[in-house]
Image (cartoon, rainbow, N blue to C red):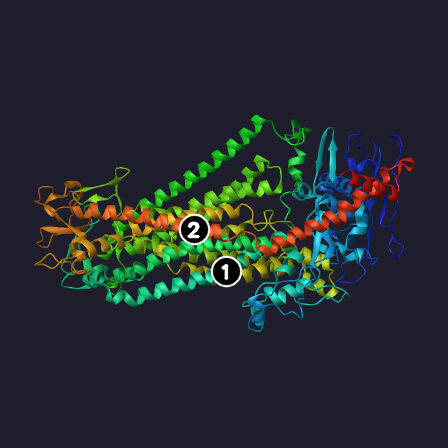
Amino acid sequence: MNGNDVLEMDSVSDTEGETVIGMIDEEIVYPEEFLPTYHSIREGATIAKVIEVEFNGKKDTLFFNDGIRRIDFILVYEDEDKKEFEKKHIFARRKRRREYFEASLMKMGMELEATRSVVDEKLMFLKIHMPWDVLCTYAEVLHIKVPIQPNDLSCRPSLWNYVSWVTKPFYPNEDLIRKEAEYFTAPFEKDRLEYFYIKDKDLFFTPSMRSRMAYYILCRAPYEIRGNIKKFGITKLLDGGVYKAAYPLHDSRFNVKSTEEDCPNERYLLFQEWAHPKSFYKMQPLDLIRKYYGEKIGIYFAWLGFYTIMLTVAAVVGLGCFIYGYKTQETSTWSKEVCDPDIGGQIVMCPQCDKHCKYWRLNSTCEASKKLCIFDNFGTLVFAVFMSVWVTLFLEFWKRYQAELEYEWDTVEFLEQEEPPRPEYEAKCIYEHKNPVTGVKEKVPYSTCGRCMRLSVGIGTVLFWIMLIIASVVAITIYRLAAFFAFSTTLRTEDLKELEPLKEYVTPQMATSVTASLINFVVIMILNMLYERVAIWITDFELPRTRTEYENSLTLKMFLFQFVNYYSSCFYIAFAKGKAVGYPGQPVYLLGKYRNEECDPGGCLIELTTQLSIIMGGKAIWNNIQEVLLPWLKNLYARHCSGQSIASDKGCPRWEQDYHLQSISKIGLFYEYLEMVIQFGFVTLFVASFPLAPALALVNNLFEIRVDAWKITTQFRRMVPEKASTIGAWQPILQGIAILAVATNAMIIAFTSDMIPRLVYYWSFSVYPYGQKYSHTMEGYINSSLSIFNISDFPEQSRPLSPTYNITTCRYRDFRYPPGHTREYEFTVYYWHVVAAKMAFIIVVEHIVYFTKFVLSYLIPDVPYAVKEQIKREKYLTQVILHETNLKLVTKRLKSPEDEITEGTIDHLSAEEGDFD
């Protein structure tokens, strides 16, 4: 066929005799160097076009009008012929691209059928079907693993088998969701069909496999070629408005069973046994989730469920620690001294800001000191060590569980296979590069210098945004200083009658901490929304080669930003606030103007607890609003605008019902993972200051599992199934957080809480007034932890304007010599004892915990022994069934008739060889 020939295409007809594929008049030129798949298309060929067919009235059908060919994917577009005249030129270009794209799909073997919307006549739905030959071709390309033989390894008896009658109510109904048969599997090979376990060709490839293969083709089919530039991929067409949507079909409505025969109703089952609120106490049907949504969705919910189960143990221990602190708060000796009118009521504290702040009585912080006792006690130390061990056990046991899922879900060798490049990467390949593995020259989208430039821009942008967050933290710190000044002058005014009932509870420190935490939470949310767009743009600009590389790059950028954004204020309160304040006669100033913040006499731990509770609580509420309320309102508004309620009465087809659902984000479950990993950081990094964090996380996760399930099952279109063997880049991030958590909790106990100074006082400095015998009591601790300052030593720029009430000295939180001493206002011996004890505590605790983590990691194997046996058995069967059988056939073909040796001759030669030996 020469360049002027016209491409002839066979028409495909349905059972009613209507033509589905025909010809159009417009011609588009194809270059010689077209993709190999389209070798039959030559220059001058005309493009085949899909002809519209009428909807057959079966609203639950998952097939073409002929009732035979299954719908594997849906594309939605608006009919350009129905548009207004002034925009005809725009829609004509879109029409050309769409027709070119559809012709490419048909040349790749896909079958198409178009149906007009029953509600909006401008809306067209293009149904895509993949025939058996095409499925076989791309199953081999994508290394899809399929059954070769039923699993003949019997499951070993487990302890759970004997108590199954107890746990049965907590699992999905086995009459509805039946356990599937287990098979040994191997990567599909088209030339060896007879060796695979094929019962029914129509059911051999699951709907999720078919959708994945269809999407693979859609991402690589060209829609326009200009010179040497090829434009291809459904993603660009969706962005350019050529198509309005692209999605695989749900198999039924979520709350009503399908009327079609042999419909598995998996969506309905998932809603009833997983997403429905009545099933909140049940385990998740992970195999069905994986079968319906793919391994990537399945591994997320498996990880989330496992994390939630492990949180149960941490929550129980943390709740016990909290109850212990609550019960002992009234018996705390140092808290009693703060509240005692004869002790705390007689101690006058120095003003905590310059000039306008007033002197104040220590017992005004009585309620704050009681609350601090709940969290700052010996139980907190035990819980912090426990959590360091818990996080190690969580990660190690997750590796084992993940290995089991890898085998069961056929993703063991997924990472070892060559992952195909992203279409966006392939579209920009213009430079030649020698592959270091194969030695073959291949095209890449950038030179070495270009790659360095892209990475430099990405790193620079991330660093800029991190500096922006640090600037916001500094701004909030300045707000703290200004707010504390304002609250100090307001809340400690004696004649402010309206605040009299709250004075006992609302101290300047508490009011400053709460308002600053709320403002910080708002700033965090705003910066999050801005940076999300920036991170995606940077990652797109870097142009990673594969989908995995893209997600890992985006994950690292987003987590670094979120880490600084969420945790910077907590790190400031824990390790910076109150650490460099000087003393009243020589205070330290921030930026030479703002006097540094001081902690309460009991330390900054209660402020850190307040910060954590506000951020964790506010984040959970905001996320639930985003995940539940917004999708529901969007779908409600879309149905109202499109009149879908009327369409339902008319028998709205399955594909049109799905179209009115929300589309999935391009980065899929990224935000769900990010939300949980940030929560994991709060639970582990700062748990020494907030033992209730695991309990709050547990409650949140119980809702999160069902909310996510409800959201993707009822409010979103069906996701394109993707393979995944692990949780990806989140695994090393979790391990990094676990390692950092040991150091942060040890430092919180050492530097933020008052536990170490109290222990030093208890064991070294608490003695009877008339003797040298240690009494081991906390009496007198408050007096020993407060230094004395002569008010006549105030410099002019910081001297208080308030009256002195006939006092000559005031107290402040530090360990310094009193005025009149030969080393006045210098650090005492007690201070250096405390510093040494803090450093020794950090070193000892870190080494013990790290050693324990190392031992546990060594003793707990990553892959269970039973799984290793099954993997070996599967590899052996694959070798025997596929490779050795094929080797025998090849050997037989290579033997020429005249050189063949009979079996008797071979035996004779073998016997002679044996005699010779």
Given the image, on which type of amino acid does mark 2 rest? Answer: Lys
Instruction: Characterize the local packing of mark 2: few (<14), some (14-19) or many (20 or more) Cα atoms within 10 angstroms.
Output: many
Residue named by callout 2: 853
Q: Residue at x 43, y 62 (%)?
A: 315
In this view, the residue in front, 777 or 801, is: 777
- Mark with earlier residue (2, 1): 1
In this view, the residue in front, 376 or 503, is: 376
In this view, the residue in front, 172 or 704, is: 172
Q: Is residue 373 above or below residue 530?
A: below
Helix, strand or loop under label 2: helix
Does residue 799 appear to the left or right of 840 in the view shown?
left
Given the image, on which type of amino acid does mark 1 rest? Answer: Thr
* Image marks 2 and 1: residues in contact by CB distance under 8 Å: no
Residue 540 seen: yes
Location of residue 862 in the rendering, given as x and y in whole percent from the top left corner: 54, 51
Instruction: Characterize the local packing of mark 1: few (<14), some (14-19) or many (20 or more) Cα atoms within 10 angstroms.
Output: many
Q: Is residue 250 above or below residue 589?
A: below
Q: Give the distance between the C-alpha atoms of the residues marked 2 and 1, in whole angstroms.
A: 21 Å
Does residue 757 appear to the left or right of 686 in the view shown?
left
Residue 815 seen: no
Residue named by callout 1: 308
Location of residue 471 in the rendering, given as x and y in whole percent from the top left corner: 38, 40
Q: Residue furthest bottom?
A: 165
Does residue 513 appear to the left or right of 121 in the view shown?
left
Q: Residue at x 38, y 53 (%)?
A: 686
